[in-house]
Image (spheres, grey):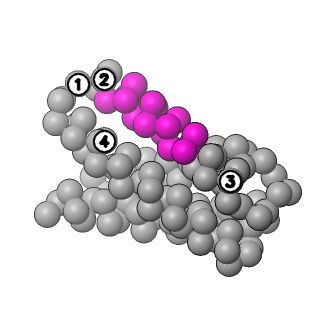
Amino acid sequence: MMLILSLIISLILTLVIELIVSAILGIKDKYDTKIIIIANFITNPLVVYIANCLILLNNTSIYIIAIALLEILAIIIEFLIYKKCLKFNEKSPLVISTINNIVSFSLGLIITKFII
């Protein structure tokens, strides 16, 4: 039950943060907003699920390296989705994906510190 709650909370927070950041970057079109939501539905649950599983290893070094690799993978997957699907072309899809993920990951860490 805790894993499901973790997945839901993480996805909601990620969507709120990344949609705000995307709007700041200039993405306001409904179609593009839907693409950002879909991209996060694809990447976020997998990253959060694997991260929760890695906590069970109780090895901080492996956890940090794995999280870094998972975040890089999420950036790449979202970049590819944005490159193929976004109509917005004022900023590079790689820039959008990278900024969104860095901000949402960083704020997620801060929020987690207050919860735990």
First-in-chain label (2 vs 4): 4
Stretch of the chain drawn in magenta: 63-77
Q: Is residue 15 visible?
A: yes
In the image, is residue 37 above or below residue 45?
below
Per the image, label 4 sits on a secondary structure element best described as: helix
Percent of width and height locating residue 52: 25, 45
Mark 2–mark 4 Cα distance, whole angstroms, equals 11 Å
Mark 2–mark 1 Cα distance, whole angstroms, equals 6 Å
Q: Residue furthest right?
A: 90
* Residue, disc 3: 84
Percent of width and height locating residue 34: 59, 72
Q: Which mark is residue 51?
A: 4
First-in-chain label (4 vs 3): 4
Task: Give me the residue at 63% from left, 46% from top.
Answer: 79
Disc 2 + disc 1, Cβ < 8 Å: yes
Q: Amino acid at mark 1?
A: Asn
Mark 3–mark 1 Cα distance, whole angstroms, equals 37 Å
Give yes or no for residue 26 being in the magenta stretch. no
User: Closer to us: mark 4 or mark 3?
Assistant: 3
Q: Main secondary structure of the magenta part?
A: helix
Q: Which mark is residue 62?
A: 2
